[in-house]
Image: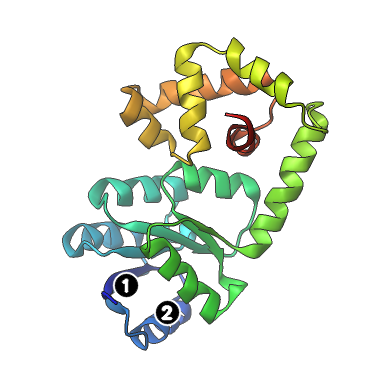
Amino acid sequence: MSTKKIYFINSETLLLESLDVFFSSQSDFAVVGKSGKASVAVKEVESLSPDVVLVDLKAAEEDGSGLLAELRRVCPSARLLVLTTGGEISAVIDAIGAGADGYMLKSAGRDAIINAARVIAAGQAVLDRGILAKLHERVKDSAADSGLSGPDEQEYRRMLELLKDHERAICVLVGKGKSNKEISETLHLTEGTVKNYLSRIYNKMGLRDRTSLAVIMARYS
């Protein structure tokens, strides 16, 4: 088993030290650094090139999504695992859109956090169980509010066919779990343009958010 370099960004000193102890005892991880300040962390991640970064969004003074995007910019190969106290679905969606590969709550416990780091290090995505439960309810509510409960495959396919080619291309990439940045690079658009297209797509299809679109694409595209 290859050893993965891991870096921690956390605003809580005690948790930062605990993470160091947790992962230092694992033979498949090598702790290469840690910081409680976003500005310091970004510079160190750029120079150390870790395989995995555990990110506390509160370490960013203002914009947690901005911190994720900056980490993605300075170290594109790093896998980013958000570790935080907030499990609001809107925050999860924003984080994934900014480049997060996983989202875990600090309350998940030592073993779950270490396992999540292993999962994203292996190239997969991971979500905290509590967040998955909220996400499930959110998708059901969104479907009910938009009149799409009791899925009708023909209706969904009809709506997708009504979209323009570039809109359908964006939908396909959303269904594959791509972030706005990745979509913009693939389709040679700005991230702002991608966001604007997504807003139009939600309106055309009667959807509330990215999550609902991803579910429909996974089922019917």
| Amino acid on which disc 2 is placed | Leu
| Vertical comparison of 61 with 143: above or below | below
Question: What residue is rendered at 42% in x and 84% in y?
Answer: 22
Between label 2 and label 1, give the one nearer the viewer: 2
Q: Are marks 2 and 1 in contact (CB under 8 Å)?
A: yes
Residue 64 visible here: yes
What's the CA distance linking mark 2 and mark 1?
A: 9 Å
Residue 156 position by quadrant: top right
Q: Position of residue 54 (x, y in %)?
A: 40, 65
| Amino acid on which disc 1 is placed | Lys
Q: Position of residue 103 (x, y in %)?
A: 52, 58
Q: Write down the residue under mark 1.
A: 34
- Quadrant of the snapshot with the C terminus: top right
Secondary structure beneath disc 1?
strand
Q: Which mark is residue 133?
A: none
Q: Which mark is residue 19?
A: 2
Extreme residue in the left direction: 47
Question: What residue is rendered at 51% in x and 20% in y?
Answer: 168
Q: Position of residue 157 (x, y in %)?
A: 65, 20
Secondary structure beneath disc 2?
helix
